[in-house]
Image (cartoon, coloured by chain):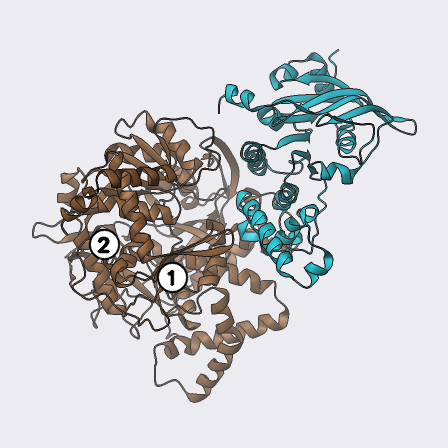
């Protein structure tokens, strides 16, 4: 294996997922396909083994009666066996439907009914319990297969099957019907449906997005060529498998390019596993990058004064020249380069290593707009972090930034094959080979998502700038105007605030209002650590959030952001006049965030209407009582008297950035 | 799991305490207490503070020797037990105030639970002879299974002293499990925990009982949690047994209500 040359799949790659599985088993059978850390040791499955296991499972599913065109639900964290099950379903021409593993049973019910799921392959007892809870309301659901038997020893249920049992049934079925899987596979065409993803959506019921083999594989190939990805890449699978972003990076691209995907030991060990593996190709939504940065900052606060000073002076240098050095800008002076290389030795290198990003060659962020400060931080320490733009409906890749032409405020030029136009109302519209086949059983919504002449409505507002890069302003429906007519882009203000490690989530309000006000969620870990160092006792989130000292801390952050906004003539009107710190963390279980942790603005504005009113009426405080759902589905109440704090608003002060 | 299945799983009496009395000088800690523990059951000892719960546990695993009474373990009768013999006969325990090695990692702390099961000599271990190395690998695998079971993979290499209290309790349980005990004594496993940590711990206790078939004797003064997970409950008050039976019977026992809520006038 030592002589193995890094190879790319030829552009005449197989056109369906099952064909790709067989292709890799043939071409690179001995290369590692999946790795999983089990009992503290990384275990490897090669491509040849993987293909054998997938075939066995496909036979197993066939013996359960799964046929082409039927839906198979996949529910759980990133586990190799769940990935194998997706491949097995596809091998029969059936359609895997991954579900968010942290969704409560009632949320899953809608999807199981809508897709008429016949077999569900789930991770563990937690998911089995959910399936049993709603099983009676899903007449189509005939079997539930589970991976981890823990706690399930005493479950007696005709429709419940251990994963090992499914494998066994697969072996029996294969010897009785040796040609069945081959025949099923031969019937699959590239334009057939490969997978279905339910969009969490910031509004309304989820919709099933139907994607074909061709659409997914075409986009993965385009990026493989664009980034020169090879089968030597290492990827860590750590995001929810039900999210298209995770599926593209750890499943579709994995099967197209044939690299290695590593599965963490548990969701809590991701940081350790990332350090073990050192992925070369990395993908993270902004909230993960924010979390990592917060973690670094907390650890720095605890470091000795000397180390802190060294860190901050190095970061200052990095902010000035780091990004230019990464972009190979020839105008950076020799002295700065020398200082940066010292900094690299002392700070940037060790920091990249601590983050598990030492070997990262290409890193992407997407899913939401990223704050420029956060983006620049990672680039300045030498990590090739780039932005991309896309959605479930477009098989992810619409725009991607090219190496050396990365800017914080754009998402790059269109990827090969994509056409973009900007409508008169500022909306971005797309044509791409990666477009979805439609929303499942919702022809109306499908029709609405296209213009009369066949362009897809992205729902995002933006424009193409002079050098052909796409610049996104905001969700089209979120961008509004203040009462005086100046532009109000809430996401931009929120991202600026979220760059502070103490602030976890922000919801800004201001459309058609004379000024901007904001809800703030503090970061319990960062503020908790800050309070500990000051000997400030607190009993929990609600208590800490209400402390006057914490209000002072957050006010400082808001003041700094306001000062920054004041230097931009367009945005000076968007300074945050007043804010309050919410008494509870926004949570997807309470429908305040989507399962991918995006703020559901309209819902929050409605749910906390009294608070919004109190902010704009400039009341000193407002009482609120909120119902909260716990993870096990029970609910309780939290109440608090929330203080409303005013921040310093600066006069417009346009100057050239120093 | 239905109650019927649980009852079917419970076996013969494994530990029988007969007429135990324990006094420290003039202070009577336990007076004439008898109860039994059946194989594979979860048996709780509850009572208000100072009722004699911890003394009872210490009698079972041989820290205290009762002045009167007999202990029958697995058909063998003892009038006194010592802690080494208790350990060798498969009794493991956790501590109310945690007795972990704070500077050692989670992994090493749990490895110490394998101590009694190590057979290679000190020299063989010091020089890592083949047999000692093979033995260590086997023990490590056992411990890794416990780490997986208790979901503490993320802290494998973390010194115990740096972990929050709830997790330290879990490590303490892990070390006791590493002994592969037949009977596990838990001394206030949920003391000082918040509701969520209590629920997690309850689930681990049930899972240990279910997966490993371990007989569990636990002490608690929080009645709510205990009633949910125990098969049978003994209630102590001022060193005397005032109730014994299934949780529902104990809950409606007037003596127990009086001990917990005070007498009504």
Picture coordinates of residue A575, whole percent (x, y): 40, 58
Picture coordinates of residue B213, whole percent (x, y): 58, 32
> Which label's residue is closer to the chain start, 1 or 2?
1
> Between marks 1 and 2, how big is the CA–CA gap?
24 Å
Q: Residue furthest bottom?
A: A334
Mark 1 residue element: loop
**Above or below A379: residue B224:** above
Q: Dot 2 surroundings within 10 Å: few (below 14), some, or many (20 or more)? A: many
**What's the residue at 56%, 50% (across, down)?**
B141
* Chain that is cyan in the image: B
Q: Quickly name the residue at label 2.
A: A395
Q: Colour of chain A?
A: brown
Q: Quickly name the residue at label 1.
A: A371
Looking at the image, residue A187 sits to the left or right of residue A636; the answer is left
Viewer-nearest residue: A274 or A618 = A274
Looking at the image, residue A94 sits to the left or right of residue A282; the answer is left
**What's the residue at 32%, 53% (across, down)?**
A50
Picture coordinates of residue B109, whole percent (x, y): 66, 51
Query: Can see residue A367?
Result: no
Q: Dot 1 surroundings within 10 Å: few (below 14), some, or many (20 or more)? A: many
Viewer-nearest residue: A385 or A584 = A385
Q: In which quadrant will I find the N terminus of chain A?
A: bottom left
Tell me the subunit letter for badge 1: A
Answer with the quarter of the image where residue B76 lies: top right
Viewer-nearest residue: B256 or B83 = B83
Looking at the image, residue A145 sits to the left or right of residue B228; the answer is left
């Amino acid at each position: 294996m030592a002589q193995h040359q890094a190879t790319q799949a030829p552009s005449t790659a197989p056109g369906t997922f099952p064909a790709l599985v067989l292709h890799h088993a043939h071409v690179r059978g001995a290369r590692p396909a999946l790795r999983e850390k089990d009992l503290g040791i990384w275990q490897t499955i090669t491509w040849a083994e993987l293909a054998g296991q997938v075939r066995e499972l496909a036979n197993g599913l066939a013996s359960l009666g799964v046929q082409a065109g039927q839906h198979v639900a996949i529910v759980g964290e990133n586990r190799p066996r769940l990935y194998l099950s997706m491949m097995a379903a596809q091998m029969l021409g059936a359609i895997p439907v991954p579900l968010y593993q942290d969704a409560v049973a009632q949320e899953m019910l809608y999807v199981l009914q809508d897709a008429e799921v016949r077999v569900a392959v789930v991770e563990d007892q937690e998911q089995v319990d959910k399936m049993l809870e709603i099983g009676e309301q899903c007449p189509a659901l005939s079997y539930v297969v589970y991976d981890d038997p823990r706690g399930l020893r005493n479950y007696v249920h005709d429709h419940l099957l251990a994963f090992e049992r499914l494998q066994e049934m697969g072996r029996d079925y294969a010897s009785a019907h040796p040609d069945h899987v081959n025949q099923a596979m031969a019937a699959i065409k590239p334009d057939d449906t490969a997978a279905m993803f339910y969009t969490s959506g910031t509004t309304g019921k989820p919709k099933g997005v139907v994607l074909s083999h061709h659409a997914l594989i075409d986009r993965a190939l385009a990026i493989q060529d664009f980034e020169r990805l090879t089968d030597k890449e290492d990827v860590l699978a750590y995001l929810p498998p039900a999210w298209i972003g995770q599926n593209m990076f750890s499943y579709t691209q994995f099967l197209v390019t044939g690299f290695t995907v590593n599965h963490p030991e548990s969701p809590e060990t991701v940081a350790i596993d990332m350090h073990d593996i050192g992925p070369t190709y990395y993908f993270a939504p902004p909230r993960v990058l924010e979390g990592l940065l917060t973690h670094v900052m907390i650890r720095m606060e605890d470091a000795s004064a000397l180390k802190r000073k060294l860190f901050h002076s190095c970061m200052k240098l990095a902010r000035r020249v780091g990004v230019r050095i990464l972009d190979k800008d020839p105008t950076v002076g020799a002295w700065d380069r020398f200082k940066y290389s010292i900094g690299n030795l002392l700070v940037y290198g060790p920091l990249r290593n601590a983050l598990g990003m030492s070997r990262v060659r290409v890193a992407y962020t997407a899913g939401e707009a990223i704050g420029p400060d956060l983006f620049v931080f990672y680039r300045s320490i030498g990590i090739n972090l780039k932005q991309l733009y896309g959605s479930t409906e477009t098989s992810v890749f619409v725009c991607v930034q090219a190496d050396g032409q990365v800017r914080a405020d754009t998402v790059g030029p269109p990827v090969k094959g994509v056409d973009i136009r900007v409508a008169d109302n500022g909306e971005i519209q797309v044509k791409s080979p990666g477009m979805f086949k439609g929303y499942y059983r919702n022809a109306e919504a499908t029709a609405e998502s296209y213009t009369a002449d066949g362009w897809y409505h992205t729902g995002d507002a933006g424009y193409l700038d002079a050098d052909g890069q796409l610049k996104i302003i905001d969700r089209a429906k979120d961008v509004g105007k203040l009462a005086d007519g100046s532009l109000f882009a809430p996401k931009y203000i929120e991202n600026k605030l979220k760059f502070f490690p103490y602030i976890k989530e922000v919801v800004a309000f201001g459309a058609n209002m004379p000024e901007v006000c904001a809800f703030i969620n503090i970061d319990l870990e960062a503020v908790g650590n800050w309070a500990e160092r000051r000997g400030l006792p607190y009993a929990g989130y609600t208590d800490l959030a209400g402390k006057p000292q914490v209000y002072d801390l957050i006010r400082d952050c808001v003041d700094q952001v306001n000062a920054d906004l004041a230097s931009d003539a367009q945005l000076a009107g968007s300074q945050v006049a007043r804010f309050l710190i919410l008494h509870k963390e926004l949570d997807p279980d309470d429908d305040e965030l989507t399962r991918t942790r995006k703020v559901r603005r309209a819902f929050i504005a409605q749910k906390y209407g009294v608070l919004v009113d109190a902010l704009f009426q400039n009341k000193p405080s407002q009482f609120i009582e909120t119902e909260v759902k716990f993870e096990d589905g029970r609910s309780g109440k939290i109440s608090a008297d929330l203080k409303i704090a005013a921040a310093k608003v600066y006069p417009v002060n346009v100057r050239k950035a120093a | 799991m239905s109650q019927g299945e649980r009852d079917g799983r419970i076996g013969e009496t494994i530990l029988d305490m007969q007429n135990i009395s324990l006094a420290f000088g003039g202070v009577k800690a336990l007076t004439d207490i008898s109860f039994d523990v059946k194989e594979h059951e979860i048996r709780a000892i509850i009572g208000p503070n100072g009722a004699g719960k911890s003394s009872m546990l210490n009698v079972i695993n041989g820290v205290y020797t009762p002045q009167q009474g007999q202990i029958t373990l697995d058909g063998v009768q003892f009038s006194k037990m010592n802690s080494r013999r208790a350990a060798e006969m498969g009794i493991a325990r956790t501590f109310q105030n945690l007795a972990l090695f704070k500077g050692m990692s989670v992994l090493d702390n749990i490895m110490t639970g394998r101590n009694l099961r190590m057979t290679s000599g000190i020299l063989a271990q010091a020089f890592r002879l083949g047999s000692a190395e093979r033995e260590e690998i086997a023990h490590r695998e056992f411990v890794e299974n416990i780490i997986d079971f208790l979901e503490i993979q993320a802290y494998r290499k973390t010194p115990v002293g740096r972990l929050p209290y709830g997790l330290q309790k879990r490590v303490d349980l892990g070390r006791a499990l590493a002994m592969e005990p037949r009977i596990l004594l838990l001394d206030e496993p949920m003391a000082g925990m918040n509701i969520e940590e209590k629920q997690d711990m309850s689930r681990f206790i049930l899972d240990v009982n279910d997966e490993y078939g371990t007989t569990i004797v636990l002490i608690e003064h929080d009645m709510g949690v205990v009633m949910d997970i125990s098969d049978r409950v003994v209630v102590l008050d001022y060193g005397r047994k005032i109730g014994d039976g299934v949780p529902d019977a104990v809950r409606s026992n007037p003596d127990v209500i009086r001990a917990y809520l005070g007498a009504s006038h």
